[in-house]
Amino acid sequence: MKWSDDALTASRSVAFARSVGIVAVISIFSFSSPPSPACALNTPEEINTVRVYKKMSAATVLITSAYASSHHVNQDLGKGIGSGVLIDDQGLIATNAHVVQGAAKLTVTLHDGARLPAELIGSDMVSDVALLRVAVQKGKYPHAHLGNSDKLEVGQKVIAIGHPFGLGYAMSTGIISGFGKLWETKQEVFQDRIIQTTTPINPGNSGGPLVDSDDRVIGLNTAILMGAQNIGFAIPINTVKTVMGELQASGRIIRPWLGVKGKFVTEELRTLIALPIVDGLMVQDVEEGSPAAKIGLQAGELDVAIEGEPWVLGGDILVSVDGQDVKSVGQYTKVLQGLKADQTIELRVFRDGDYRTVSAKLGERPTPPLPQQRAKTDVPPLIPQVLPYSQF
């Protein structure tokens, strides 16, 4: 059979259209099919971050704190939420003291959904560290490995794991942006070397682990800075280790107490103020009934502002303790760490242009009073940007 030119042309057009259609269908399937799961993680860093999260989330817990109403008519329980981290294979949990402070009942939810009542072993509001225990079968749940916070570096990547707003397990990432010294917070005193991080911290993250890229806990997330963005703080894990040891031994932390609050004299102050001033801790307040009050240490009475910073002038200046200078933050911290409650010490004080030496027997720092009522959602403490006082 002989094809006409028109028929041949039409046949070729149909064949071409079919071939194009087949190619189009193949292209559609080729480009519209979802990528394989292996393609979702493109870099070694992503792969490691997912690995760290999967491992550490299994050791992170949700803590629910119930608080009895302070009013006899309203008997409902307020509730707070926070996080914690398993630190051994027998149910020992580290968290923040402000997560469990004043709670009538504590409940821990483990990674597999098990809900267990928790026993409070001890709590220390000064360091904001608390220790809980839940009854679990030994070795049933994985626990975290603790790192060394003294070896951290600014710029190091960190991961926060917890239960923000109680919405379930979640992680956020950031870097260590610095190390700070925070005083006069709602918890009274913080560590002298607290971790500052860009990792977002939200209600429910408090007490959860801050982790490095080797899945080691290097801190407990604890606070955020008022008025700032992505400036959070974590308690160094080495501090947590020390506090946990004392809480396990006695259920509380015994700290020395002199009963003064003050600020370290600066060069600007010495330059601008026409008063006899030396380097040291200028006493701004003396606590009633404290060892400092008993030996007659005097606080200042002249309120001034220097370059926007408040000062109270005219008080004693503490220069040394037992012959060791306390003229800077570093010296003060080192000396304070070596003192104990009930210890008798010698203080060298500058007053009215003269030096004098007095003896004082240190007391035990009183425990901060518990609040009568708690908010229903645990919010990380808001740290004010002006943190003026050192406390002894």
Image (tube, rainbow, N blue to C red):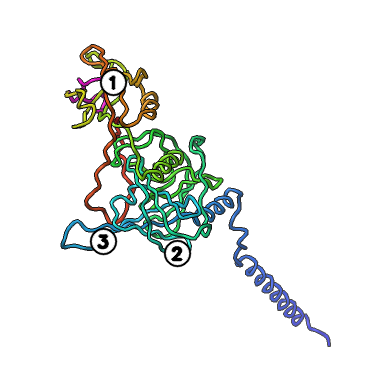
**Could you give the CA–CA distance between mark 3 and mark 2, rounded to whole angstroms?**
22 Å
Q: From the viewer's perspective, tell me whether residue 225 is left or right of residue 75.
A: right
Q: Are marks 3 and 1 in contact (CB under 8 Å)?
A: no
Task: Please give the residue where the numbered disc 3 appears in the rendered image.
Answer: 77
Does the magenta portion include 9?
Answer: no
Residue 208 in percent (x, y) is at 42, 50
Compare residues 198 and 358 and report the one nearer the observer: 358
Q: Residues within 10 Å of mark 1 (few under 14, many from 20)?
A: many
| Circle 2 SS class | loop
Compare residues 39 and 338 and report the one nearer the observer: 338
**Residue closest to the far right:** 1
Q: Residues within 10 Å of mark 2 (few under 14, many from 20)?
A: few
Residue 113: which disc? 2
Residue 357 in percent (x, y) is at 27, 16
Residue 330 in percent (x, y) is at 39, 25
Q: Are marks 1 and 2 in contact (CB under 8 Å)?
A: no
Q: Can you see residue 298?
A: yes
Looking at the picture, which amino acid does disc 2 mark? Gly
Does the magenta portion include 305?
Answer: yes
Task: Please give the residue where the numbered disc 1 appears in the rendered image.
Answer: 318
Mark 1 or mark 3, which is nearer the start of the sequence? 3
Looking at the picture, which amino acid does disc 3 mark? Leu
Mark 2 or mark 1, which is nearer the start of the sequence? 2
Mark 2 or mark 3, which is nearer the start of the sequence? 3
Residue drawn at 32 percent across, 45 percent down: 381
Residue drawn at 33 percent across, 19 percent down: 320
Magenta stretch, residue numbers = 302-318
Looking at the picture, which amino acid does disc 1 mark? Leu
Residue 275: which disc? none
**Could you give the CA–CA distance between mark 3 and mark 1, rounded to whole angstroms?**
47 Å
Q: Are marks 3 and 2 in contact (CB under 8 Å)?
A: no
